[in-house]
């Protein structure tokens, strides 16, 4: 008998029939003899509607009351699923974040979990009761409902699995696993049976939408085995039908490259003709940091005479206008000639822990893009990834080319 945490996203519980379907899946695990806790999101579209209610009343709202409103979506789903399980003869009870409790800091709308008191939950589960937990929420130090930010139900599930000592955390969604790249673009993309925490973290942060980044960070920290699988598809005869996110030691032989991610949520900013003197980078990026604008890829080109430099970097597409505005206000201090902004770019990343022990991975990427006439605008690297910025019009061509070059196409 194992202890499992099952998490179901918004599309999985999108209507009453889907909630009944989830209840049947939970019953299968209970019938197999497992102790089960379930974490649920709000029904698809509900959180967006609740957020809009807040915004329609006030553009600058109290974050504590915002949390009280948006957390109600998960409360509804958890109660409905508990009722559906009871209809199937399963002993079940819904739990809100404050009832467990899931204790967080006081940063409303993007709270971080500090501790989970699982004593009562643990006792109930040992008696065979299924705990249906409202994801995305907790209770702050000041005894107010708090929420973890969008996608926070994944984080709730992984944190609960860690606190309960669960054997595995199964994340049920509308895809059947983690693919080598987006199968909607690359028909030859294949599902991975296993992927390391580090690779999944890079993929999540670089554009893959399968898992929320914070949940992967937490899984890696607490070594929680996470499985991504579909609510809507069955995989008969398979003990682990989805993709298992695990420690590197659990994968016998690493692939050179495990996946290729892309993000269209990028914009490029170039400051042309910046005076090249000590501290210029701090003067550029300091005001952006003060405005809570995250800067990602950075490249600097110094002029031949060494007097000026061009500074190019990327920001989130939604932050482009604000970034330009901040930099224009600092023009006299920065002494640049002009700003060039470009939102028609995409970041493409090749990811794999096998890169640590193999040379030439980046060169292969650069050659494949060059052979297809794709110009690289910015490059950044880490131990297990190489990212490039290219014109958005080349997204599909670049993904397909790299997928083939690294041998990821289906056999």
Image: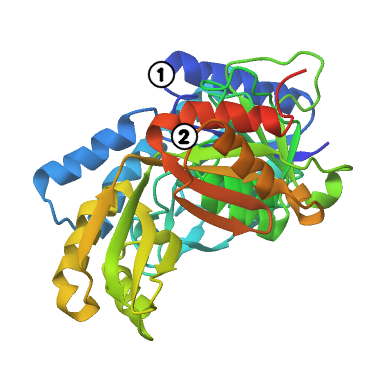
| Coordinates of residue 99 in the picture (x, y in percent) | 48, 52
Q: Nearer the viewer, mark 2 or mark 1?
A: 1
| Coordinates of residue 144 in the picture (x, y in percent) | 34, 61
Image quadrant in which you'd find residue 314: bottom left
Question: Quadrant location of the N terminus?
Answer: top right
Q: Is residue 330 above or below residue 24?
A: below
Closer to the camera in the image, 240 or 317: 317
**Residue in view at x 59 percent, y 57 percent:** 381
Between the C-alphas of marks 2 and 1, the distance is: 13 Å
Q: Is residue 170 above or below residue 360?
A: above
Mark 2 and mark 1 residues within 8 Å of each other at the beta carbon: no
> Could one spot residue 106 in this view of the protein?
yes
Badge 2 is on which residue? Answer: 78
Which label number is shown at residue 373?
Answer: none
| Coordinates of residue 270 in the picture (x, y in percent) | 31, 59
Closer to the camera in the image, 178 or 378: 378
**Residue in view at x 71 percent, y 29 percent:** 408
**Residue in view at x 68 percent, y 14 percent:** 234
Closer to the camera in the image, 251 or 71: 251
Question: Quadrant location of the C terminus?
Answer: top right
Left or right placement of residue 361 versus residue 399 in this view: right
| Coordinates of residue 104 in the picture (x, y in percent) | 46, 63
Give the residue furthest to the front: 305
Image quadrant in which you'd find residue 350: top right
What secondary structure is marked by label 1?
loop
Query: Sequence order check: which comes first, mark 2 or mark 1?
Result: 1
Total numbered circles: 2
What secondary structure is marked by label 2?
helix
Badge 1 is on which residue? Answer: 15
């Amino acid at each position: 008998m194992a202890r499992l945490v099952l998490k179901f996203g918004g599309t999985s519980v999108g209507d009453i029939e889907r909630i009944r379907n989830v209840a049947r899946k939970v019953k299968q695990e209970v019938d197999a003899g497992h102790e089960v806790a379930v974490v649920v999101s709000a029904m698809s579209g509900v959180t967006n509607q609740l957020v809009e209610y807040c915004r329609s009343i006030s553009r600058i709202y109290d974050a504590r009351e915002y949390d009280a409103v948006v957390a109600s979506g998960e409360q509804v789903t958890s109660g409905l699923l508990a009722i559906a399980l009871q209809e199937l003869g399963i002993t079940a009870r819904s739990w809100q974040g404050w009832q467990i409790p899931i204790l967080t800091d006081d940063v409303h709308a993007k709270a971080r979990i500090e501790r989970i008191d699982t004593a009562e939950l643990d006792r109930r589960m040992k008696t065979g009761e299924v705990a249906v937990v409202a994801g995305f929420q907790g209770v702050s130090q000041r005894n107010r409902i708090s929420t973890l930010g969008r996608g926070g139900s994944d984080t709730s599930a992984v944190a609960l699995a860690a606190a309960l000592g669960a054997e595995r955390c199964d994340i049920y969604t509308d895809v059947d696993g983690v693919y080598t790249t987006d199968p909607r673009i690359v028909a030859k993309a294949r599902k991975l049976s296993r992927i390391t925490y580090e690779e999944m973290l890079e993929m999540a942060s670089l554009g893959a939408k399968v898992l929320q980044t914070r949940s992967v960070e937490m899984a890696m920290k607490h070594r929680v085995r996470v499985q991504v699988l579909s609510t809507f598809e069955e995989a008969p005869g398979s003990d682990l039908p989805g993709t298992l996110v695990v420690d590197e030691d659990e994968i016998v032989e690493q692939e050179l490259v495990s996946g290729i991610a892309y993000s269209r949520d990028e914009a490029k900013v170039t400051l042309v003709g910046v005076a090249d003197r000590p501290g210029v980078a701090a003067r550029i990026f300091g005001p952006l940091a003060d405005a809570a604008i995250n800067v990602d890829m950075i490249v600097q080109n110094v002029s031949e005479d060494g007097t000026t430099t061009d500074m190019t970097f990327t920001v989130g597409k939604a932050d482009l206008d604000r970034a330009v505005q901040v930099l224009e206000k600092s023009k006299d201090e920065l002494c640049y000639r002009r700003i060039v902004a470009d939102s028609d770019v995409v970041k493409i990343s090749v990811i794999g822990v096998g890169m640590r022990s193999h040379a030439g991975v980046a060169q292969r990427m650069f050659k494949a893009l060059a052979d297809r006439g794709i110009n690289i605008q910015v490059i950044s690297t880490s131990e297990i990834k190489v990212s490039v910025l290219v014109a958005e019009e080349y997204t599909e061509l670049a993904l397909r080319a790299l997928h083939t070059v690294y041998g990821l196409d289906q056999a």
